[in-house]
Image (spheres, helix red, strand yellow):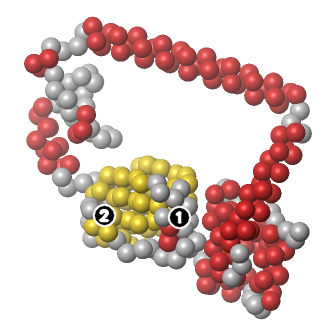
Amino acid sequence: MESIGKVLKKARLEKKLRLQDVYAQIKISPAYLKALENDTTDSLPSPEYARIFLRGYTSFLGLDTEKLLTQYDQDSKSSQSYREKNTDEKTKKKILLFSIIGLALILSITIIFAVRHFVNIVNKVTPEKTRDYSDLVIADSPLVTEDTNLINQSTLDEYVKSKSELLELKFTTIDETWLRIFADDKKLFGGTLHKGDEKVWYAKEKFRFRIGNAGGVIIQLNGKRMPILGKKGEVFKKVIVTKEGIKTS
């Protein structure tokens, strides 16, 4: 069976295309295309990026995308199995040691939180003075005081008003894609969204994100559906979302 890289290169040459010609059409860096053709996907940013680039490239060349993705997954598993079989005993001992340390830390943290929770229950504010504002609390909220059971009442009205002015961005995934998103320059998420996933984020002024499959998501801004960003497999390195709408570059 021919390697994925040979299949890609053969198809490109049959179409008499240079890597630069492909880049002009699908906006995938020639260096990444060359890595796919050379079967050196380890040099790509991540396995998720490799699958996204492979999907876009095979689709552009008119190849059987799903077949080649399946072959890529099988090759990746085989490579991983080979690396695992050749891991020496010293490395395994290190992994075991770190696992034990990690479990010990988790147990310690669990005990600490359990004790703090018990103390809070014993010393909680009387019911008539306690109110639940959990639905109003977001990152960096000015409402939260040093005592997590109390709310800064002086800023409550202002915060409720500001919450109604937040940007709400909803992603519904219709095809697997890689995403890294920031709200007001604070990172919210970075990883792979799978088909059927739904994510809702909020920002005060703007969102900024990078997406590896522009045609793989349906976006709603404050409840209003936005046009599809681009084609399946198309990569956008910078997308800005404000109250005025979505801008890509």
Q: Secondary structure at mark 2?
A: strand
- Mark 1, secondary structure of its residue: loop
Please give left or right for residue 132 compared with residue 21 in the image. left
Distance between the alpha carbons at the discs numbered 1 and 2: 19 Å
Callout 2 environment at 10 Å: few (<14), some (14 to 19), or many (20+)?
Answer: some
Residue found 43% across the figure and 49% down from its top: 188
Residue 193 drawn above or below residue 100: below
In this rendering, position of residue 205 left or right of residue 38: left
Depth order, front residue of 218/115? 218
Q: Residue at x 17, y 30 (%)?
A: 152
Q: Position of residue 127 (x, y in %)?
A: 14, 17
The answer to whether 61 is drawn above or below residue 157 in the figure is below
Residue at 33 percent across and 9 percent down: it is: 119
Res. 221 mark: 2
Q: Nearer the viewer, residue 193 or 23?
A: 193
Tell me the number on the disc at residue 238: none
User: Which residue is at a point 51% across and 59% down the rendered structure image?
Assistant: 195
**Is residue 29 visible to us here?**
no
- Name the residue type under label 1: Asp
Is residue 106 visible in the rendered image? The answer is yes
Residue annotated with mark 1:
175
Determine the image quadrant of residue 50: bottom right
Relative to 236, is 10 on the left or the right? right
